[in-house]
Image (cartoon, rainbow, N blue to C red):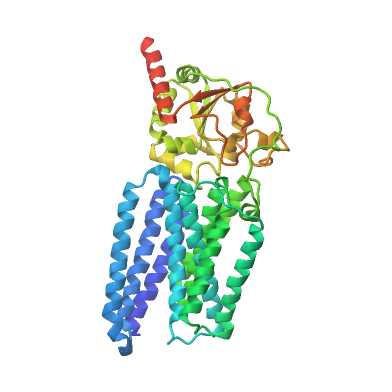
Amino acid sequence: MNLQPQLIIDASYFAAAFLFIYGLKRMSSPVTARSGIVVAGVGMLVATLASFLYVFGVNEAAQPHLTTNIILAATALGVGTLWAWWSGKRVAMTAMPQMVALYNGMGGGAAAAIAAVELLRTSATHTTIPLIVTIVGALIGSVSLSGSLIAWAKLDGKINGTWRVKGQQVINGALFLLTLGLGLFIVFAEHGHASPQVVAVFFGLALIFGVLMTMPIGGADMPVVISLYNAFTGLAVGFEGYVLQNPALMIAGMVVGSAGTLLTLLMAKAMNRSVSNVIFSNFGATGDESQGEIKGTMKAAEAGDAAVNMRYASKVIFAPGYGLAVAQAQHKLFEFVKLLTDAGVEVKFAIHPVAGRMPGHMNVLLAEAGVPYDMIYDLEDINEEFKEADVAVVIGANDTVNPAARTNKSSPIYGMPILNVDQARQVYVIKRGQGKGYSGVENELFFADNTSMVYGDAQKVMVAMIQAVKQLEGGH
């Protein structure tokens, strides 16, 4: 390869790596997160465009394929860009978790495709270490692809419930060992020059394993699953970057892999469970038979009465959940919050780490509605304030506010950190019905003496609350 194009490529990859890391750093704060995403996106654009510079240094033997490769690469880039722009613009905020799962699966699939090309290149000279890395990247990328697609289908309602058979873990373990064994056969017996049929069987088994590993996992664990597959995709990309000796892919893969791993551990900790427990347990398979009898009764309240109570409160804390996203009520919620703050009420938002269906889902939802960042607090920063609150309002949340996790040792969610909404003087739960959360566990909060249920779609309830406060102010 000519020196000048190679120098530009190396400089571009260095710049892309810096932009990846700097962008990730800015994503750590809600104030700078948007610009951090733009910075990291610019880094990816630089790395992508730099790859086209390889055409200026190809040898003469590769010239016959040069035009075809450029056309294919440019076409793929154009189609992918247009489709991503179109789908990103039209996707609803409620469907953002599904979109993240889908895009994450595409990243894993891309890494697996790179591995497939390397394994099927008969002209390549394969050595043991790069071959092992290729196989590992292929396995992880394939699992991430099929597993993320199942996660997407579950989140989008195309697959309901879980699929479990007797001896599921044994079947999954045997399939994994078989896939790994075939990968080792390709490395040591075939020295990387396996037949296309053998390579196809390897990838087929890996894809099936991803499906079987994800199908038994309940909906309550989807935030952890999405984060885990995100880490898988990063690792796969990093491994294939090593095989291709591409610094941008290696650094991007390591950054995504490490960030995804840390986030996965954080999500699991927020549910008081280990990652292995999420993947291999049957959590959520049954109802709450072991929870014991719940004392008390559910008490209904009108939206207008609850709104008036909040209008004359000193401090109100909102705890949003996925029901807020389903109802697309974030804008009406903030409109109501502004009425309260104008009346001198102190208002804060409490966010549980696994609220919604993906990490940070509620933060993004509230930011879209224009809620100031200084009104939004994480669990550990606000939990002690609930005992000082006159009113706590739960909107579409369930398991993340269930006191059984703190007090009932017989409950399946015992030990899971929760928002202490039950410690407020008055609790209002805005909910469409009396259904249970993703875990299938009855919520003891709903039966507490200081809790009232405001039944209805969250957006319609917020509209009623806004009207009640406005009529009250007009009456004055």
Question: What is the x, y in percent for residue 21?
Answer: 46, 61
| Number of numbered callouts drawn | 0
Front position in the image: 26 or 160: 160
Q: Does residue 237 appear in the picture of this structure? A: yes
Residue at the top extreme of this rendering:
476
Looking at the picture, how far across and down is residue 361, in whole percent? 47, 44
User: Is residue 32 visible to the viewer in this orientation of the structure?
Assistant: no
The x and y percentages for residue 221 are: 57, 48
359 vs 209, nearest the viewer:
209
Residue ID at (32%, 86%): 62
> 65 above or below 86?
below
**Relative image position of residue 275 (x, y in whole percent):** 63, 54
Task: Identify the image quadrant of residue 37.
Answer: bottom left
Residue located farthest toward the right when viewing the structure as drawn: 409
Q: In the figure, is residue 327 to the left or right of 442?
A: left
Q: Residue at x 64, y 67 (%)?
A: 174
Of the 4 image quadrants, the one containing the C terminus is top left
Q: Does 226 appear above or below 293? A: below
Left or right position of 358 against 83: right
The single residue placed furthest to the bottom in the displayed view is 61
Residue at 65% in and 46% down? 272
Who's the residue at 62% across and 52% down the image? 278
310 above or below 416? above
- Quadrant assignment for the N terminus: bottom left
